[in-house]
Amino acid sequence: MNKPVIGILGAGKLGTTLAKLSTKAGYQTLIASSKPAAKIQLTISVLAPKATALSAQEVTRQADIVILALPLSKYKTIEKTGLAGKVVLDAMNYWWEVDGTDNIYTTKDHSSSELVQQYLSKSTVVKALNHMGYHDLEDEAGNGKDGQRKAITLAGDDFKAVAAAAKIVTDLGFDPLILDSLAQGRILEPGTSLFCADETQKSLQKIIDNELQKL
């Protein structure tokens, strides 16, 4: 079976790291930033040489699954039409230095990914690839056998979408660990003991159990 085409919105440190891992795993990978594709072509050719730099509109239209690696405060700039009916992996995090000091993205009523899901109402959002730093993602990918590799936690409401995301996480070189709902994705956000966690499945599950008790 052919692998889905992966699109990445955001060509910063996380986006380029994911593009490098994605192409290494055998995925056709498209990447875009807020700049014209020609402006990031040199950067992509150095950091993720097998990925293709395109416009954001082209990425959303051509990719089968799209990863959001943008500053969270930019989520409403995402062009929704091309993402309709597609699985979207939300790797974004609130960071006050970039997104402002007034955190409107995570409240008692919603996690940041639920807010993104409300905006992308015709897509299926899965929280994924956000809690491990880009440097650890690159360094840890593929290290160890199943069960001994570092784990990436995912959260979503749609079984098929989460399964598709878990397959990508596995192919990138990590063991997936799945939460029960998109709402539980708030335990993956900055300020929790899971954020920046670089652990195996077993160790990560213990941290998750502790965080879930706080909800």
Image (spheres, rainbow, N blue to C red):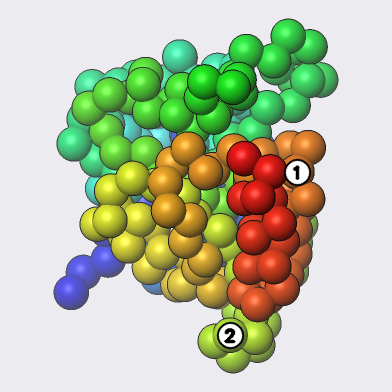
The residue nearer to you, when weighing 169 against 162, is 162
Question: Within the image, what quadrant is residue 73 found in?
Answer: top right
Q: Dot 1 surroundings within 10 Å: few (below 14), some, or many (20 or more)? A: some
Which residue is pictured at 66% across the width and 39% down the height? Answer: 189
The residue where tag 2 is placed is 147
Question: Within the image, what quadrant is residue 132 found in?
Answer: bottom right
Q: Residue 95, relative to residue 170: is it above or below? A: above
Which residue is pictured at 60% across the width and 20% down the height? Answer: 107
The residue nearer to you, when weighing 179 against 172, is 179
**Residue type, mark 2 in image:** Gly
Which residue is pictured at 24% across the width and 57% down the height? Answer: 160
The residues bearing labels 1 and 2 have C-alpha atoms spaced at a distance of: 23 Å
Q: Which mark is residue 192?
A: 1
Query: Residue 121's x, y, as percent?
Result: 28, 24
Q: Residue furthest bottom?
A: 145
82 relative to 138 in the view: left or right = left
64 relative to 151 in the view: left or right = left
102 relative to 61 in the view: left or right = right
* SS at circle 2: loop
